[in-house]
Image (cartoon, rainbow, N blue to C red):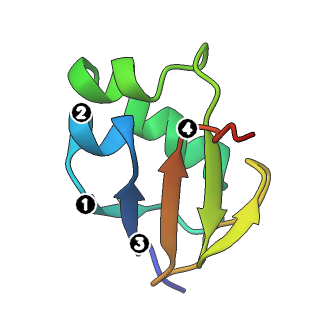
Amino acid sequence: MPTSATVTVRYFASLREALGASETVDLAPATTLGQLRDALIARGGRHAEALARGRALRCALNQVMADEATPVPAGAEVAFFPPVTGG
């Protein structure tokens, strides 16, 4: 049984400005999107500020909108971005 899962995390809009376009992250198996966000926040610094729990953020798993309870499989692409308003 694998001990970690490698995923690609992509950032968009203001998050990209703060954190860069993407990074690779190793996760424990059965990690959810919310747990991934918390792990990134725990790094402190720019990650803690950009991904803070007080900020409204959307997330997608393999280019499909998902909520934070969604498990992240190995090899997945996760995207974080601010909500978009339009008119």
The location of residue 39, given as percent across then percent down, is 44, 38
Residue ID for mark 1: 23
Q: Residues within 10 Å of mark 1 (few under 14, many from 20)?
A: few
**Mark 4 / mark 2, whichever is N-terminal:** 2
Q: Which mark is residue 5?
A: none
Residue 16 falls in image quadrant = top left
SS class, disc 4: loop
Q: Which residue is mark 3?
A: 7
On the image, numbered disc 2 is attached to which residue? 18
Say which element carries label 2.
Answer: helix
| Nearer the camera: disc 1 or disc 3 | 1
Tell whether 75 sits left or right of 18.
right
Q: Are marks 4 and 3 in contact (CB under 8 Å)?
A: no
Q: CA distance from mark 3 to mark 2?
A: 20 Å
- Closest to the observer, 79 or 43: 79
Q: Amino acid at mark 4?
A: Pro
| Spot occupied by residue 67 in the image (x, y as percentages of width and height) | 78, 52
Disc 1 to disc 3, how far (Cα)? 9 Å
Comparing marks 4 and 1, which lies closer to the viewer?
Answer: 4
Whether label 1 touches label 2, CB < 8 Å = no
